[in-house]
Amino acid sequence: MANPFEQPVTTGALDPTANPFRPGMGRVPPDFGGREPALRRAKHVVDQLTRGQAPPAVLYRGVRGVGKTALLAYVRQQARSRGLLTIHLEADRGDADLTASRETLLRDGAALLDGPGSTEVPLAVLERRSGHVVARSAGSPQATFERAVGDLAALAGAAGRGVLLTVDEVHEAEETLLKPLLRAAHRTAQDDLPIGVLLSGLPAAAETLFDEGQTYTERLERVELGLLDRDGTAEAIRSPFAREVGAEVDEFVIDAVQDGSGGYPWFVQLWGAALWDLAGDPTRVRLEDARAAGVEVHERVEAFFVDRWRRVPSGRATRLVVTLAELGGEAEMSEVTTALDLTHQALSPARREVVDRGLAWAPGRGRLAFTVPGFADWVRRTRPDEGGVPG
């Protein structure tokens, strides 16, 4: 057998180490096909911060795997290249006292305390102690966090440097983190301080805050990220091939990718990676390449769904997931309880379990849906509850 370090083994005509596609949750793809409006909105935020202005907060919403986390990561890259300070937080419902988020905010924003004009800025809670930035208590964890954001905005204004704050998974901590953050952003915008907020979460994220009609939600813009249409898929697949090696991609290939992925961005990246590795011609990707790629993608997708199934709790939670799949992957809870012949109270713990594990979410009051496309079809086809897949 040949030593792969001495004689690399390839399966196609293109160098696998140069494969530009990035399958994986949260990874920045080579091209955001079909996401021009979302990127344009983010660029507007970055441009305003670069000019020292206060942009509106933007919330990107969508199911898992549609590119929310990747988009935030890409925008942070672009913001840093323009000289902005970036801070990223991960919302966590378990972080009830905001400790982790507050410490990240203080650590990554510490440079502003040493910036021009910082000594002239009256601060509500931030101060240096023994070389470290700390936040004095403002009475509650939420109030302390809110005032810390306000202090950073004031320091950013004095230094003439914009700050981009991104927060992922905001549906996990709407009351704990999102509400004080939006209040702070609303107040700093009134003073035109250069701090911008980009958020991401599941499709119903912040809906309860919008329903409350509070003034701090007035400047929060919602951008919905759904599945890609054929044009978006075509761009996501064709652009990397054209840019990296000048290769063309046949129309039949795009059809195969769209049909096989359903326009789900994470699956589109799986297809792109497989097409690159298996292409037989360095200048053109043909239908036979798509057929071979389809086999590989199918195996990866099957493994992905098997992993998700292994996260399903046993007992009533299993029955809940199977029933939801039989109902199409989204349904009223009343339909689920009727199908299972259980009361809402009896099914509530199982519902909470599948939501807490990221398997499902609530698209509306009294409704439940899977967080990734295709899972319902997979459950109906394989019947994992009957031993159709490895447990």
Image (cartoon, grey):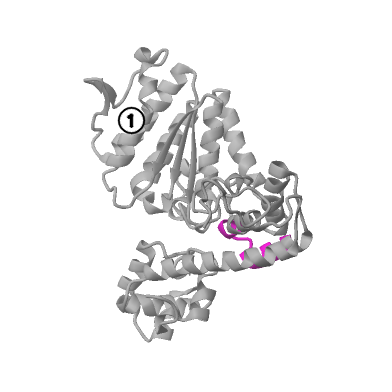
- Spot occupied by residue 301 in the image (x, y as percentages of width and height): 53, 66
For residue 334, say whether it is visible: no
For residue 185, say whether it is visible: yes
Q: Nearer the viewer, residue 199 or 335?
A: 199
Q: Is residue 256 magenta?
A: yes
- Spot occupied by residue 164 in the image (x, y as percentages of width and height): 48, 32
Numbered range of the magenta stretch:
254-268
Q: Main secondary structure of the magenta part?
A: helix
Residue at 29% from the left image edge and 47% from the top image edge = 95
Q: Which residue is mark 1?
A: 106
Q: Nearer the viewer, residue 302 or 279?
A: 279
In the rendered image of this protein, does residue 294 appear above or below residue 152?
below
User: Given the image, on which type of amino acid does mark 1 rest?
Assistant: Leu
- Secondary-structure class at tag 1: helix
Q: Is residue 154 left or right of residue 125?
A: right
Q: Is residue 328 left or right of residue 312?
A: right
In the rendered image of this protein, does residue 381 appear above or below residue 74?
below
In the rendered image of this protein, does residue 363 appear above or below residue 168?
below
Residue at 75% from the left image edge and 60% from the top image edge = 286
- Spot occupied by residue 144 in the image (x, y as percentages of width and height): 29, 35
